[in-house]
Amino acid sequence: MAALRLRESVLEAKQKLAAGREKLRRQHEAGVPGVQLCAQNTDCFDGIILDLVNAAADDVPGFTPEKVMSKLAIVPHGGYGRRDTAPYSDVDLMILHEGTFREPAIQFTKRLQQDVFDVGLILGHSLRTPSQAISAAMADATIFTSLAENRYLAGSVSLFRQFADPFRHRAKQNFRSLYHAIMSSRDEERMQYGEVVHMLEPNIKRSSGTLRGIQMVRWLGFAKYGEVELDALNRMGVITDKDRKILRDARDYLLRLRNELQFHAGKSSDLLDRTEQIRLAEKYGYQGTEGLLPVEQFMQTYFEHTSGVRDVARHFIASIRPKSLVVSLFGPLMTRRVDRDFHVGPYQISTSKRWKQQRAVQLDEVLELMIAANRFERHIDHPTWEVIRNKFQGVGEIELTEATRRSFLALLSEPGRLGELLRRLHELRLLEKIVPGMAHARCLLQFNQYHKYTVDAHCIKTVECATEFLHRDDTLGAVYRSIKKKWLLHLALLIHDLGKGFSEDHSIVGARIANEVADQFWLTPQDKETLHHLVLYHLTMSHLAFRRDTSDEQLVLRFAMENGPAERLKMLFVLTCADFAGVGPNTLNDWKVRVLTDLYRRAMQHLGGDDTIDTVALRRKKLDALATSVHGRENEAWFRKVIDSLPDAFLQETPVDRILSDLEQLSEMKEDSPMVACQFRPDRGVLEITIGTKEELMQGVFHRLTGAVTSQRMTILAAEINTLADGLVLDRYFVQDQDHDGQPPDERIEDICQRIRKYVTDPNDQAPTFTTTWASRNQRMAEEAIPIPTEIKIDNDTAENYTIVEVFTQDRQGLLYQISRLLYEMGLSVHVARITTHLDQVVDVFYVTDEHGAKIVEGERLERIKRELGESLLEQKS
């Protein structure tokens, strides 16, 4: 019935919109380019808006339609003004009016607004005089950038010119303030939408290197030169032919993607999420290879375009950046010559005219400039970089001279601004001409939920992360500072993941690349072997630290012997930490640093390094301190018996006062009430939950405790199951609270303890309830898109007394509980658990024994464990 009340003009417009969209959909499916389709869509919008404008003008009482339109000007702006509207884009209109015509203009606008809404379009509108519009734009960067993309649609041409011409003139007059306002606004948008997450699931309108990057060139071009069109800026000589082509090709590509997203969704949509990435890869015919998924090929193409936009936009922005008045006045006074052609100022390093004309064409000379920039920690000034960029952009193969090889390794030797400079080389595609394998890794996406960067970006980021360790006031910082051949460490980081994207294990492929790199740079046999080792075994330390029980000193000894001498172990330690840090923000947390540092220090003990600890002496010292503390107590014999049964890992990790506190609580524990204690560990950034009980009181203690902990929205990082004398069980969980960053409130900690205590004393062994969260739903979507295969591995060689069960699978709520319960139902006892959700996949590792506490050696039973675990997990996942 509501449709019958709509005006005839609105009904006709609705039909025109539906017919127009259907026609455009067919054209899109037929392969019409993105720019062309958006222009046709804009024409469709124009026709509808003009019909509604005429109807609204006819509805203003006391004025003829001609009179109304002589006092108004209809001005599309933003994307609508730019003529690149997607099928479900908003319609942004500014209605200009003469100053004395405000009331009729308001009536006109109300009618137009209602009609546009009834048609099914989203209208963003403003009602202003020309002077009001200009004032608003000068005061607000968001308004300015939208109005910069203006065009005339209907009404008074004279009124439109009263806005457009002075607006262009005022913009150029106020370029300095507008530049900073526009850049500040973009920074705020970047903070809102993020850079890292949107590398994986980019917003094709707002993320780095997308349509927004192209628009930034247009907006700043208007503010500086009074022109928004790329062709006009090219004719003025402010963007090169190559840069214009990069932006035009990317614009067409991104607009076509955006059209596809919106046609498929049937609504406005700019997010290229994982489900859409997979769908589009299939739609556009990507076949994949043995080492690359179709979606990874598709996203590599996407990132090629967005990387180009980012680089061109960054260069254009730098080329028109207003000079600081302070630097202009005092910079020359604070600049000194450090070479015949290099001049170091307070913020930048510049070059002489002679260098730009004669030496900028030689790669080794460019590297020497970068060495100086790195040493003095200065940016290369834009005029110099512009010359370099123009010389090398699109250059073919380059012969690596001895000077080039020497200069590149010298560049790698200093931390300084190394990450930034490597990115600059990569931007010009020079890095891939120097380092074998870098071209293959360019824009290569790793389609999993842990890596936040493409392979090439990750490798450069790890180098940058390592250089930032220089300023850490801990063992990691000290080790990095002590490394003699930092260039070798940085080179290993730069190439450590270049083996990805092939069917073979990336560490093995990477090791071959390392040999090729070593030969290319004429490394000594010793340095070549070190580089090869670091790349081949770059995951070894993280796997040992987070997937094995490192309280086994023989395991640590073997690790030390395999990764020595001491200098190489130092490099592996720093490389491992940098690899974590380069995955994404907060991946290298205090917990991981502490665990890796402990492993490093204990391994160094076996290599005779400077940073050593005597674990045997430390154990003896703690046992003596505990014995002294319990001497003379009424139940001293009980304490001594329990202390003698404490596992090495518990003694190593726990301070004496904390051990005493736990034992005292165990001694006072009632038969029907387990001991539960929670303590935040600020040194690790985790919550430590200690649970004590009697083994005979609760069958399947590990899976029940695990269920209790995870049901309280705790992410378990590690678990230790300690069986002590007299059948006592003292378990420790190191967890992170999903509901709080840092230390949880006291009431939260108390609530956790109470709920765990209640659950473990429940006589019914029922599965706990796991809260479904947004994150877990998102993970399920990713799993459905590209499922991580479930794989079970058995390791019977590493530990003398335990069978190690490794479970590789997709993370989900309650996973650890499910696995631990399955192990219990198979008659296995868990003694140590390691839980990792980092790098390539989720891995849960369990040290288990059979019903009699013995290692499992029967081949048939081992195969049954693998089969039943795998089948059960697949069934529960589905």
Image (cartoon, grey):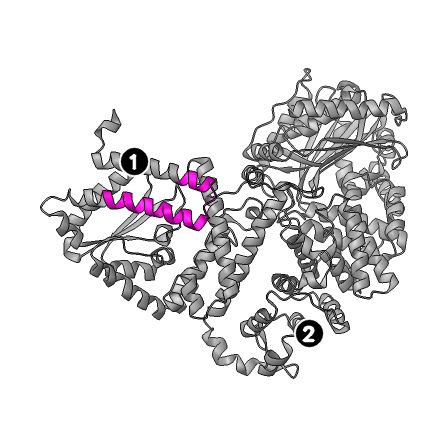
Q: Quadrant of residue 457?
A: bottom right
Q: Is residue 36 magenta?
A: yes
Which residue position is annotated with label 1? 14
- Please state the horizontal and vertical placement of residue 627, each as a whole percent of the image: 86, 38
Dot placed on the residue nearer the N-terminal end, 2 or 1: 1
Say whether residue 449 is visible.
no
**The N terminus is located in which quarter?**
top left
Local crowd size for mark 1, using a 10 Å CA cut-off: few (<14), some (14–19), many (≥20): some
Say how many tags the image has. Answer: 2
In terms of depth relative to the viewer, which is nearer, 565 or 656?
565
The secondary structure that dominates the magenta segment is: helix
In terms of depth relative to the viewer, which is nearer, 254 or 815?
254
Residue 338 relative to residue 382: left or right = right
- Please state the horizontal and vertical placement of residue 683, each as a whole percent of the image: 69, 47
- Please state the horizontal and vertical placement of residue 95, each as a whole percent of the image: 24, 52
**The C terminus is located in which quarter?**
top right
- Please state the horizontal and vertical placement of residue 582, each as a whole percent of the image: 67, 52
Q: Is residue 362 magenta?
A: no
Which residue position is annotated with label 2? 368
Q: Residue at x 54, y 34 (%)?
A: 774
Residue 304 relative to residue 364: left or right = left
Q: Is residue 20 above or below residue 710?
A: below
Q: Amino acid at mark 2?
A: Glu
Which of discs 2 and 1 lies nearer the camera? The answer is 1
Q: Is residue 170 above or below residue 589?
A: below
Local SS, label 2: helix
Distance, label 2 to label 1, CA atoms, is 65 Å
Say whether residue 106 is visible.
yes
Q: Amino acid at mark 1?
A: Lys
Local SS, label 1: helix
Task: Give the magenta part as a residue range.
Answer: 24-51
Residue 383 relative to residue 651: left or right = left
